[in-house]
């Protein structure tokens, strides 16, 4: 019998719809890291990220069971869109916005590569990361969003475009303007990133 781990997402979904619960477990295991990370990077709270992650998979299961899942698209992009929409809904309801803040769990912006890992170097690196996070947080929503999706969720520009319902050129343009704005803020505030 073929291992579930080498099946395509489409095969796993079909197996799940035919009653194989392990197929869904394999699908969840395959994609949970990327989906959870993208949620966490938006909400910045572990408990809230866990709640939205669970709600995402409840919606996925409900869609599968109701027969409304469209197999034309890729599962991961579709699941990320559900997660993204749930995050947006949460912030609309609570009138909060995602912030980029230092976190012990995630340290993905590797801005400075320091060979010597002594205490002083680690402090400088942590301060640099905090400065970058603060600059990203000051960006307009669309630019901040593309930075988070690209660098934290590690999505391609094609995936970002699909997730945010814009063209690839728009996604690339938002990244370009985000980087221009970050450089401008660094220059205006005379921030040293080293």
Image: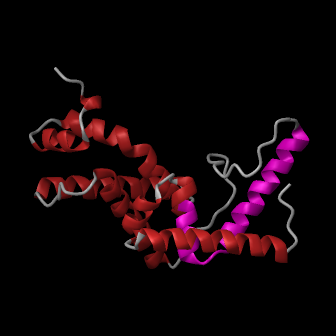
Magenta region: 119-148
> From this viewpoint, which residue is outermost toward the right?
120
Q: In the rendering, at what x and y percent does residue 136 appear?
A: 66, 67
Q: Is residue 53 above or below residue 185?
A: above
Check residue 158 for magenta coloring: no
Q: Is residue 123 left or right of residue 86?
A: right
Q: Quadrant location of the N terminus?
A: top left
Q: In the rendering, at what x and y percent does residue 164 appear?
A: 41, 70
- The residue sitting at 46% across, 61% down in the picture is 157
- The residue sitting at 32% across, 56% down in the picture is 79
Q: Is residue 6 above or below residue 130?
A: above
Q: Quadrant location of the C terminus?
A: bottom right
> From this viewpoint, which residue is outermost toward the front?
169
Count of marks, rendered view: 0
Q: Is residue 180 above or below residue 121?
A: below
- The residue sitting at 80% across, 56% down in the picture is 128
> From this viewpoint, which residue is outermost toward the top?
1
Q: In the rendering, at what x and y percent does residue 60 appear?
A: 25, 55
Q: In the rendering, at what x and y percent does residue 92 appear?
A: 45, 78
Q: Is residue 120 left or right of residue 94?
A: right
Residue 174 appearing in the image: yes
- Of 81 and 187, nearer the camera is 187
Q: Main secondary structure of the magenta part?
A: helix
Q: Quadrant of residue 181?
A: bottom right
Check residue 132 for magenta coloring: yes
Residue 97 appearing in the image: no
């Amino acid at each position: 019998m073929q291992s579930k781990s080498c099946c395509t997402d489409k095969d796993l979904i079909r197996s799940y719809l035919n009653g194989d619960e392990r197929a869904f477990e394999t699908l969840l295991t395959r994609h949970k890291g990327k989906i959870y990370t993208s949620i966490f990077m938006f909400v910045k709270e572990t408990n809230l990220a866990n709640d939205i992650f669970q709600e995402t998979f409840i919606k996925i299961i409900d869609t599968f069971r109701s027969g409304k899942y469209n197999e034309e698209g890729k599962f991961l992009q579709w699941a990320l869109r559900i997660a993204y929409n749930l995050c947006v809904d949460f912030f609309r309801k609570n009138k909060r916005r995602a912030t980029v803040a230092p976190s012990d769990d995630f340290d993905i912006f590797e801005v400075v590569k320091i060979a010597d890992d002594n205490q002083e170097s680690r402090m400088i690196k942590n301060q640099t990361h905090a400065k970058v996070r603060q600059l990203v947080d000051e960006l307009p929503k669309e630019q901040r969003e593309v930075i988070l999706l690209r660098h934290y969720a590690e999505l391609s520009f094609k995936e970002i475009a699909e997730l945010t319902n814009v063209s690839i050129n728009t996604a690339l343009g938002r990244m370009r303007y985000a980087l221009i704005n970050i450089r401008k803020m660094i220059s205006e505030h005379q921030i040293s990133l080293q």
